[in-house]
Image (cartoon, rainbow, N blue to C red):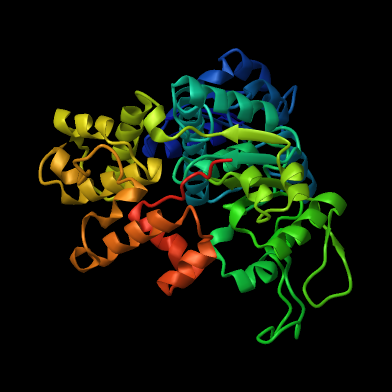
Amino acid sequence: MSEILIVEDEAVIRRSLRRLLERHGYAISEAGSVEEALTLGLSGFDLIISDLRLPGAEGNALIEPAGEVPVLIMTSYASVRSAVASMQQGAVDYIAKPFDHQEMVILVQRILDERQRARAHAQLKSELGEVYPVSGMIGRCPAMQAVFARIHKVAPTDTSVLILGESGTGKELVARALHENSQRKNAPIIAVNCAAIPENLVESELFGHERGAFTGAVGTHKGLVEAADGGTLFLDEIGELPLEAQARLLRVLQEGEIRRIGSTATRKVNIRLLAATHRDLRALVELGRFRGDLYYRLNVMEIHLPPLRDRGDDITDLADQLLTKMCKRLNRPPLAFAPPALDAIRAYTWPGNVRELENSIERAVILADHDTIGAESLAIPQSSRPTPPGTVGAASSDELSLDDYFRNFVREHEASLTETEIAKRLGISRKTLWERRQRLGVPRRKEKS
């Protein structure tokens, strides 16, 4: 039951307001002045309703000692000036006398509901801060603790950060954690997957274009770099960015300006750049597929995310957390893993990392008929290791499904072909190639330098 303190020097009004609020289930205490109210201990109440004009100090004098307890000011002087003054001093709201009873009840309920939500949010934030050190990320292994420490150190700066790790390890979570713990947290973070944008549209999407700049440019388009002005630009899979777009991006980093395609005018932008890749950018520089000057501009600070197979007991913590999340999202009652399921989770190497684990658990929750999830529901391959690239000839192409053929073809050729070349060989777009990789859990293998 919410406890409300009424501070009003007129006994008739005080009693009337008390009866009104008690009928609606609130516990009421009374005081006739600020001095009397202070003797009651303000922190024990959920709401203070005070008249502005009181003998001695005015009702506004309660706002500061009330601390986090909201103070609703009543006054018969229904002027804008007194309302503004009360709100500027920290009153939660203002109501003029004589007030409608229903209006008062609705206002009181709204204030108490908002306070309850704020308390719940603060409690959740505190719990998340204890369990998940950085923006929902969990990890007790030394490698993840090093990641959290690096995030806390570099986040408050405007330094460019290169986030390295296999597909599905949570590189975007790191980027968002860096943004949320930076001075730019109230500005937007624009996340762009470079591999998911068709190569002929990358420059237009990133840097914008003017009307008539090329066929199909029927209007002016503001690029994503410009949209991130004042905030953070996160370029995922930056290793897939074409060389022409790399040159434009370098100018953004060096000069803090962009020029839309088809425009002669430059525009100033103020962004913090975060980039991520699972590829070896240094090796790409040596192969002439990535600009060396851009690489050195990006590689001011690195954060390495370990693959899931190297995170020890973190995998079971993650599995439990993802299971709880999936049950809530899919409107299912709480479920638990059977011991064989946990054994299977620990034994598998998870080439798709956290993303693959999440997809496997989502499927298991949908299929679950009991309150526990068995190993068979997870559909984890019996082999604990993914098929090496050199074993694709074990079965003929006629015996393979389309998905198996895709997996085998990509694994056999990704060391020697670029993403664009693989997509052309398969007869699909680069965006479709990327989407199918994610769906089938076929991340790019890290190139050796």
Please say whether residue 9 is visible from this viewpoint.
no
Picture quarter containing residue 148? top right
Judge whether 205 appears above or below 158 on screen. Answer: below
- Looking at the picture, tell me which residue is in the foreground, 89 or 236: 236
The residue shown at (53%, 35%) is: 135
In the image, is 384 to the left or to the right of 353? Answer: left
The residue shown at (39%, 41%) is: 353
Measured from the top left, where is residue 127 in percent x and y? 45, 26
Measured from the top left, where is residue 51 in percent x and y? 65, 34
The residue shown at (75%, 57%) is: 249
In the image, is 323 to the left or to the right of 89? Answer: left
- Looking at the picture, tell me which residue is in the foreground, 107 or 428: 428
- Image quadrant for the C terminus? top right
Measured from the top left, where is residue 337 in percent x and y? 19, 33
Measured from the top left, where is residue 441 in percent x and y? 36, 51
The residue shown at (52%, 34%) is: 305
- Image quadrant for the N terminus? top left
In the image, is 154 to the left or to the right of 133? Answer: right
